[in-house]
Image (cartoon, helix red, strand yellow):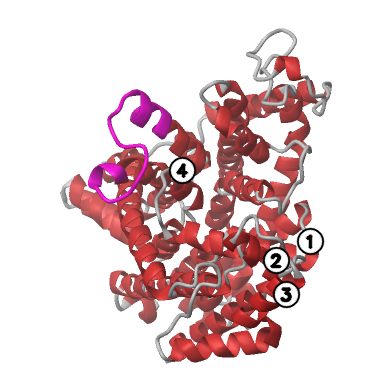
Amino acid sequence: MRYLGRRLVVLAAVLGVIGLLPWLTRTDPALTILHARYADRPPTPAVLDAIRAETGLDGGPAHVLADWAGGLLRGDLGRSWVSGEPVGPDAVSALGVSLALMGCSLVVALLLALALAAPTLRRGARRRLATTRAGVGAAVLAALPEFLLAAVLAAVVAVQLGWFPALGWGSAEQAVLPALAMGVPAGALLGRLLDDALPAAFAEPWARAATAGGLPPRRIAVHALRRTTPALLPQLGLMVVGLTGGAVAVETLYAIPGLGGTALAAALAQDLPVLQACVLLLLLLGLAAGLAARLGSRVLLGPARTAGALPALAAPPLPVRRVVTAGAVGLAALLLAVAVAGLLRDPLTVDAAARLASPSAAHPLGTDALGRDVLARLGHGAARTVLVALAVGAVTLLLGLVVGALRAGALTETANALPAVLAGLVVAGIAGPGPWGAAAAVAAVAWAPLAAHTSALYAQEKAAPHLAVSRALGAGRVHLLRRHLLPGVVPPVVRHAVLRTPAVALALASLGFLGLGTQPPAPEWGRMLSENMPYAERAPWAVLAPAVALAALGALAVLTSAAVRGRRRA
């Protein structure tokens, strides 16, 4: 009962903040609603007053929230302020579409995760794990922007090859491309986390005993998956909500009437009843997914979770191949060289005669739609993109560790259910648009997966038998935390945070594209992607340059983490 009560309190608080959005923004909500209804109608005082009276805006936020809450208790989600239609049927229909798309994407993600972890599963089940895998391939796939992957699949597979439809929703064929675009980055992230956890499972005594007893490698691999799955189940639960509500770009590109796009359109149009209904459905989905992950973890761990008989998952001291260190150094040098070369050029000069020019001696990486040098913008945007992403990543890591250790599941599930764009609208309404407001908005929701990971690992570490022995010998809380709990929790969560660095950069870019973050003409890698996407077929270099840079950033982060991990073990 306490579990449900905490989540309902947080849910009510979030819906209350969302209800204040018309009064937080710096524009007149009545004017925004008028423009959404009638694009050409003049905003006279009489017309605006009529809209305020019709929507209840003239009564203030308390009146609007009380009226909506009263309707909710009667099962009525209200009527749209823009169309005047009942909100409930459209919101439920959009949720059904998003859930179907999420299910297809989740299948792709799980299959890819197993494929990426298969080499470790195969070698570990045969006692042949000799070195730590760097996981560069998974890092590159995880760093791929969903909207870029969706655009490439639509242009190549749908338009040029004609294998699948490029637009619409309603058939199995129409679900293939959007499911791939959303499932590949999610599966790469999940596969990297699984691959990182498996060596610790194979190093446990049961694995050695199973091999000595002649147990088939396939059964040993299945048991290793079961041993590592409880720590990843919260990630899977959060992924369910993220794929449902965070697929705005993919839904827009493929013309899919899903919940994420509906929520974004309602937020931009100040259509409060529709927005509150979408957020309510996402939060309820997050509540259900979190509960399912919690129950699944308890079932998999069994009585060992509370009996203090669960061994801690300690990674074995596997060496890291020299090529990993060399790759990290080489990739860092390459990115630094590109950044320095770009800093020597002007990123703001517009040359209309050189629009979308191909790479040449004058423009080594070509030009964009305004004739600006791509190399110059890539170099000048490096510091802004990388430093802000690293700063946000550090804040989210700290928040994730603290909230996860406190086991604040209600906050975690709620933050994960809120799209970063919606958080950006709230923050921008309070502080105004700008890079630091966008950074605060992303940090406000991006810590949730790290907190879920921390909480799951923390629960397993607390169930280890050596912890009970240390308590019996008189060890205090500080000693247990410093010598037993944190060493088993912090390293995997840090590697998880490193893997999410490119995703943070893309979240910042999506806010900038909506006018809530870095403002043009300032160069920034994510904004470069968004600005040049309409010209991807004519000038692919303008899109490939920032995309490759983001993928290289993800690969560098993973290589550096693996190299440092190997040096510490050595």
Identify which residue is drawn at 38% across, 44% down. 178
Give the residue type at disc 2: Leu
Residue 124 is at least partly visible in this image: no
Write down the region rendered in magenta: 153-174
SS of the residue at dot 1? loop
Does label 1 or label 4 sit earlier along the sequence? Answer: 4
Q: In this view, does 467 lie above or below 362?
A: below
Q: Where is the N terminus found, in terms of image quarters? A: bottom left
- The label on residue 401 is none
The span from disc 4 to disc 2 (Cα, nearest Å) is: 28 Å
Residue beneath disc 1: 432
Does label 2 or label 3 sit earlier along the sequence? Answer: 2
- The label on residue 31 is 2
Give the residue type at disc 3: Ala
SS of the residue at dot 3? helix
The span from disc 1 to disc 4 (Cα, nearest Å) is: 28 Å
Does label 4 or label 2 sit earlier along the sequence? Answer: 2
The span from disc 2 to disc 1 (Cα, nearest Å) is: 19 Å
Q: Is residue 271 covered in magenta?
A: no
Q: In this view, does 498 lie above or below 479?
A: above
- The label on residue 46 is 3
Nearer the observer, disc 3 or disc 4? Answer: 3
